Image (cartoon, grey):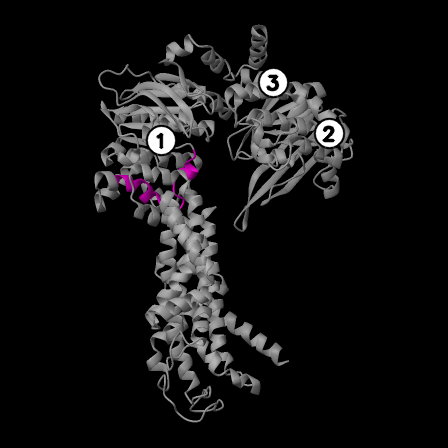
């Protein structure tokens, strides 16, 4: 019964948020982009709304959060009651506060990592497809070698060598993920570089950078965007896994992945608190993929 | 009811879906076909020819629906008959021959296996009998080595042979009706003749009725007893072949004839330094020489047509001139100066001088760029135009190719028709302000009326801008209308080269004569006469 009720409430919320977001985005968008939002499916509107909320929360974390990020405020594992609306964790820190700060750290790092992986991976991949020959061979074999090492082991190794800081964490995970993006971008670009318009651009005397940026990338966008949605979610997993092993985000910095682990004992008592950060990750993942699907649909629609 | 009528279509309407809306493709067409009769369906692309042809099998493509009218095939209403009935008819009593045999055969199976599938599935004959029958039909289709050819894979036989093998396959169950959808459009003129003759003979031998779909009037004149002209889903007129050719009733039909009459006035012979000269070029891929000792010049304002079958080295010559394929021997001179062999070694100005227009505008224009950037980029790059000057230049160019600048400047290529895309290809070439344009089969993928527009445009621009033009084509009708000089190529060698008038009037080489005599003429007796004449020679 409870399951049914929560399902209905959830669906209702989904529709209300989606519809409201669509109306709001339409009103806020400049006239040129308005048709795009008008034809937007409800899922995409919902996804955009969720992402927007996450971003606002992440940016305004110090303002919104009722307490300090690492502040120990009382007993451990307090139940949901004012002033700790979502209780406290095993060190007596406010759960809500840490969720809010977690948005900033986890989402920020995941986004930076994925973006970096995509820029590096797709530029190199397209360049390899375009240049061919020894450059393609060299880069591709290097990537093959990197991909042959299990990702987690490889990241551990790199983090041990370079030390753990947020910056090295971002760079290491980005480097590992960029190999996957490289593979995809190269194979997509190989189908594009044989087209006559690329030949025409080469004959015109265009440089590599122009070819990559203006001639190939716009045509390779659809599969890359789809991959972005997936990669973004995998990066959460990598960060959580590394944090779990003690090489990720260091305490007391709040991070959703480690929050699940730290409070896991509560689950045995039937308390759902530890699932809240997991739910936050899940919701964002779903939202990102809704938006990605929509963009993908638009991109493929333009083609035919 | 007339026992002699095989297929009777009345008031047929077919809709196609675009987005959520249905719009009509075929708007109430009647069609009657007697047993053993060949009906030609002609019209531009988008006229609904293929859709109508498929509807004669009771079939509508994905995204299409038959929304009205009746299709009566020998007493069976194909619209209301259950799918099982229709399926039992298809392949057995109604067969279909597609435009591209290469794309329609399954590349993973031998020809004979695909031949036998129809008769065996329909229970007409056993596998052994079907194989024997295949050899017989291959022989009747005049395929070389009829005993063995069936055991080859599709990629092991030539395009013309494949098209004949497909016709044999359609014949396997001795159907009452065959639908030919542009069966020779993708073939060279010399190959086309063999296929046309084979198709005509076999249809007559078995007394099969046929619907022959094409956009080429001269071809349909050889094949059909009656011709029906379609325009945007409506019938324009229908008449007996000879009477329609002699006296077309409708204005539109006459315009289809008139296309072939466009002729560019011949330009005075070039003097002084040629814009481009190809000197003793030998080039190829890997160890194979595709071109051997090719030489010719192109002067300003002159159009040199390079003709030959596919594989004769026409496009390779263009690749040598543009620098995509550095020659092994010989050189390319532009304005008297030797060009570096590869395009990477050429200066920006040398690249600018020579611009290429491609056959397939679909793959030659980046589908993600708007016309503003497509056309503007060469002007920005070569001439250093920016801001207002660039904008003005783009608008000038659009006006030059007869497209309204305000409407088109921010469109994507997918928002244009085939002819408009080709015009954009031309505008992009002109934006560089070149001295030579290389047109690689630029009209092959277009309808005849659209072709004429493109040819007239090229002619006008060539005069206004003093361009030299190298025109690669296998279509001799186009050569007749626009060329000043003709270079005939065969297997990488220039076999004959001369002014158009002299070459057409008095070809010196056998190959040129063969090529010229293979161009279909509007006369319905042309194929008979040609085959008779060649039979005497042999």
Whether residue B279 is visible to the viewer of this picture, yes or no, is yes
- The Cα–Cα distance between marks 2 and 3, rounded to whole angstroms, is 21 Å
Name the subunit of mark 2.
B
Whether residue A46 is visible to the viewer of this picture, yes or no, is no
**Residue pictured at 34% horizontal, 77% vertical:** A60
Disc 2 to disc 3: CB gap under 8 Å: no
Q: Quadrant of residue A28?
A: bottom left
Q: Is residue A87 above or below residue A23?
A: below
Q: In the rendered image, which residue does mark 2 sit on? A: B173
- The Cα–Cα distance between marks 2 and 1, rounded to whole angstroms, is 49 Å
Query: In the image, which disc is placed on residue B197?
Result: 3
User: Foreground residue, B463 or B354?
Assistant: B354
Q: Residue furthest bottom?
A: A75
Q: Quadrant of residue B452?
A: top left
- Which range is magenta? B360-379
The first of marks 2 and 3 along the sequence is 2
């Amino acid at each position: 019964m409870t399951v049914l009720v929560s399902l209905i409430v959830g669906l209702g919320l989904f529709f209300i948020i989606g519809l409201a977001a669509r109306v709001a985005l339409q009103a806020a968008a400049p006239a040129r982009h308005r048709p795009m939002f008008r034809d937007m499916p409800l899922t995409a509107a919902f996804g955009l709304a969720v992402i927007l909320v996450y971003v606002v929360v992440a940016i305004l974390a110090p303002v919104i959060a009722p307490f300090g990020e690492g502040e120990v405020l009382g007993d451990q594992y307090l139940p949901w009651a004012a002033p700790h609306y979502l209780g406290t964790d095993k060190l007596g820190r406010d759960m809500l506060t840490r969720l809010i700060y977690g948005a900033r750290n986890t989402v920020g790092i995941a986004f930076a990592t994925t973006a970096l992986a995509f820029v590096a991976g797709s530029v190199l991949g397209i360049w390899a497809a375009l240049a061919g020959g020894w450059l393609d061979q060299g880069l591709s074999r290097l990537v093959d070698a990197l991909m042959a090492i299990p990702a987690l082991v490889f990241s551990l190794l790199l983090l041990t060598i370079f030390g753990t800081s947020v910056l090295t964490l971002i760079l290491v995970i980005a480097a590992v993920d960029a190999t996957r993006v490289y593979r995809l971008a190269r194979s997509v670009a190989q189908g594009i570089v044989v087209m006559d318009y690329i030949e025409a651009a080469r004959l015109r005397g265009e440089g590599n950078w122009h070819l990559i940026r203006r001639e190939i990338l716009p045509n390779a966008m659809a599969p890359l965007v789809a991959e972005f949605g997936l990669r973004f979610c995998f990066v959460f997993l990598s960060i959580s896994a590394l944090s779990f092993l003690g090489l990720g985000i260091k305490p007391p910095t709040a991070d959703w992945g480690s929050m699940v682990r730290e409070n896991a004992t509560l689950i045995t008592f039937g308390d759902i608190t530890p699932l809240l950060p997991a739910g936050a990750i899940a919701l964002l993942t779903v939202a990102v993929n809704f938006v990605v699907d929509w963009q993908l649909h638009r991109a493929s629609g333009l083609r035919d | 009811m007339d026992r002699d009528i095989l297929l009777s279509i009345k008031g047929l309407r077919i809709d196609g879906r675009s987005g959520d809306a249905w719009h009509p493709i075929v708007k109430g067409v009647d069609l009657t076909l007697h047993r053993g009769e060949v009906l030609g369906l002609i019209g531009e692309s988008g006229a609904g020819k293929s859709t109508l042809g498929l509807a004669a099998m009771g079939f509508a493509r994905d995204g299409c629906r038959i929304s009205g009218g009746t299709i009566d095939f020998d007493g069976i209403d194909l619209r209301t008959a259950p799918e099982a009935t229709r399926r039992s008819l298809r392949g057995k009593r109604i067969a279909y021959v597609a435009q591209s045999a290469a794309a329609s055969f399954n590349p993973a199976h031998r020809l004979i296996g695909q031949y036998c599938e129809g008769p065996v599935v329909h229970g007409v004959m056993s596998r052994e009998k079907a194989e024997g029958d295949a050899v017989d039909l291959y022989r009747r289709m005049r395929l070389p080595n009829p005993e063995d050819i069936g055991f080859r894979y599709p990629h092991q036989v030539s395009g013309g042979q494949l098209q004949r093998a497909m016709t044999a396959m359609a014949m396997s169950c001795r159907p009452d009706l065959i639908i030919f959808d542009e069966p020779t459009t993708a073939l060279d003129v010399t190959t086309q003749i063999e296929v046309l003759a084979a198709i005509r003979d076999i249809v007559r031998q078995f007394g099969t009725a046929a619907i022959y779909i094409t956009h080429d009037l001269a071809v349909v004149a050889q094949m059909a007893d009656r011709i029906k002209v379609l325009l945007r889903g409506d019938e324009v007129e229908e008449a007996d072949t000879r009477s329609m050719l002699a006296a077309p009733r409708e204005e539109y039909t006459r315009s289809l004839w008139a296309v072939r009459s466009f002729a560019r006035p011949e330009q005075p012979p070039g003097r002084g330094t040629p814009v481009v000269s190809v000197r003793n070029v030998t080039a190829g891929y890997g160890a194979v020489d595709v071109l051997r000792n090719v030489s010719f010049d192109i002067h300003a304002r002159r159009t040199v047509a390079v003709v030959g079958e596919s594989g004769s080295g026409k496009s390779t010559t263009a690749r040598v001139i543009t620098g995509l394929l550095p020659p092994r021997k010989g050189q390319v001179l532009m304005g008297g100066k030797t060009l570096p062999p590869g395009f990477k070694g050429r200066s920006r100005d040398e690249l600018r001088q020579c611009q290429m227009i491609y056959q397939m505008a679909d793959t030659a224009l980046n589908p993600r760029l708007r016309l503003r950037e497509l056309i503007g980029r060469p002007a920005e790059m070569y001439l250093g135009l920016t801001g207002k000057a660039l904008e003005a230049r783009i608008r000038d160019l659009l006006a030059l190719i007869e497209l309204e600048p305000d409407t088109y400047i921010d469109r994507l290529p997918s928002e244009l028709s085939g002819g408009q895309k080709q015009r954009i290809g031309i505008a992009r070439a002109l934006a560089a302000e070149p001295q030579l344009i290389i047109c690689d089969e630029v009209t092959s993928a277009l309808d005849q009326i659209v072709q004429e527009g493109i040819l007239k445009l090229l002619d006008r621009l060539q005069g206004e801008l003093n361009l030299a033009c190298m025109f690669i084509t296998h279509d001799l009708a186009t050569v007749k209308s626009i060329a000043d000089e003709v270079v005939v190529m065969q297997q990488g060698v220039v076999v004959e080269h001369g002014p158009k008038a002299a070459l057409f009037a008095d070809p010196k080489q056998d190959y040129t004569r063969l090529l010229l005599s293979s161009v279909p003429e509007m006369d319905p007796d042309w194929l008979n006469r040609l085959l008779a004449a060649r039979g005497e020679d042999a």
